[in-house]
Amino acid sequence: MTVGSHPWRWVARWRERAGLSGVWRWVYEISLVLLVTVAATFPAATADWYPLMPWLVGATTPILMVLRLTNPLPAYVAAALVGLGTGGQSSLLLVVLSASLGYRVARWWQVAAGLSLAWACYVGSIAWTDPLDVELVVVYSALFVLCAALPAGVARLVRRRRVLLAAMHHRNVQLHSQQSEVARQAQTRERARIARDLHDSLGHKLTLISLYAGMLRTADDDGRSEAADLVRQTSSAAMTELRQILGILGQDDSQSAVRPLTGLDELAAQARASGAEVEIVRAGEPRPLAALTEHAAYRVIQEGLTNALRHAQGGAIVLSLRYEPDALVAGVTNTVGQRVVRATSGQGLLGLTERVRVAGGMLYHGSTPDGGFRLAATLPYPGDERAVPTAEHRPPPAAEPEADFAALMDRDRRRSRLVLAATALSVAGCLVLCAAGVWLMMALVIVDRDTYDAVRVGQPEAEVRERLPDPDAAVTGAVGGRDVPGAVCLDYQASILDRHDTDVDLGQTLYRFCFRDGVLVDKQTFQEQPS
């Protein structure tokens, strides 16, 4: 890269910090800068307090508006100092800069410090037109709250809301990715479960078919016909189970069809048809079982019987089902026999162990003292009601689509705007009520122009005093006005609006009422002179 490209990189970084990413954003910012500059410069030009003031306001306002995008606190402080030197900030400029301060500054104490300094400069700018007094400080403070504190507070709420929504969006995107991974793992577990079902069910049927095929080689014609029928029936049953297992893929339930333990008799009959010596031993009082428990017990006995037919042909096989007080024990025991199938991979026992574990039980397999083999599972009973597959055995819910999440965010954003608007109106209403209260309190101790004009010289003192505030509220020791010999005079402050109607900037406006011999002998308006 050349040296000349460095300024462009700086401009790109500034645009990123300022958030000027689109054309419409640029149009908005340029229009706002022009509007605020004109609104601030025109009053400064008409005031004509000193020649450089309009130029100072017109030059600094666009600079401060641009600076607020990246450095809002320095821009706010600079605007307050410029306002102090030019008779006060423009109301529109104060609103815009206060909103930027509340929205773009991260730390709340910096916002509070900026507002405090701006308030001091805003109140101090009164000295350009009027002397500082309590009433004007209260009025200007109320205006500052309306034009600065309220926009900054609302902008602060918007900032917090958007930061929260951004964090929620980021978190939901993460959850969406995790949910996809969970769904993928669930699919993997489902495939493994289907593979175990295929192994448990079809493995047993195919073992019987292998045994029946061996019988065809040694049987006579009648025997061959009977063995062929057995092969056909067993093959048909294997295909039926295959269709049932593959049908699981189209079901919502994560559990395959539960094999009832009443089917053990049919299972034993099929094994006996192959020439095996099979006995069923049941003990204890049968009781309702959970679906997982009953299915696992059936699969344990089926797997044990299949292994016995494969590895111990000709031996005695005992299928046991024992209902203990606290658990169900299902198992298969066989004596020594002839191995007719070569060694297997052992995946059947691994899958069976997992199935029993999911049902809350334990699986045991090992040799017996007489050289045989025993496979047994201890499965707990359900609670007071028949157990159903729990949430951990069901597939996780599908992740919410991004479109639904976007709609939810958009609806929440609209509600947020309504809440902020209602909050702003409520705060404005409170400020109006406070200002009305201050005005009412001030009205009780001052005299307005209408009251002054309604009083006539020569009117009885009693009637005049009914229109005037309590004499204790009168100003004492006022300097100014003309003296009336032999009269008792009361001086009252004029209202704030009446004071601004005058062209005199020195002192405060007072109304004087002089009484003698029970009659109003004089009334006058004057500006109190500094003592």
Image (cartoon, grey):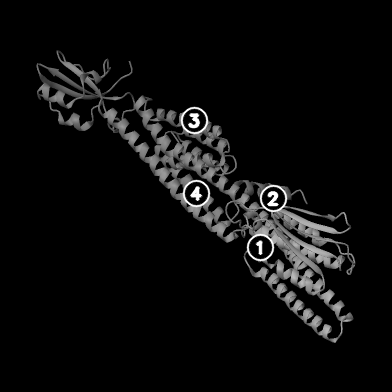
To which quarter of the image does residue 230 belong?
Answer: bottom right
Mark 4 Cα shell of 10 Å, populated few (<14), some (14-19), many (≥20) = some
Callout 2 amino acid: Trp
- Residue on which the image places disc 3: 116
Residue 411, given in percent of the width and then of the height, sits at 49, 55
SS at circle 2: helix
Between marks 4 and 3 in the image, the one whose residue lies nearer the viewer: 3
Q: CA distance from mark 4 to mark 2?
A: 25 Å
Callout 3 amino acid: Ser
Labels 4 & 2 near each other (Cβ < 8 A): no
Q: Earlier in the sequence, mark 3 or mark 1?
A: 3
Instruction: State whether residue 50 is above or below residue 279.
Output: above
Q: CA distance from mark 4 to mark 3?
A: 25 Å
Residue 242 horizontal side relative to residue 385, left or right? right
Q: CA distance from mark 3 to mark 2?
A: 38 Å
- Residue on which the image places disc 4: 32
SS at circle 4: helix
- Residue on which the image places disc 2: 8
Callout 1 amino acid: Gln
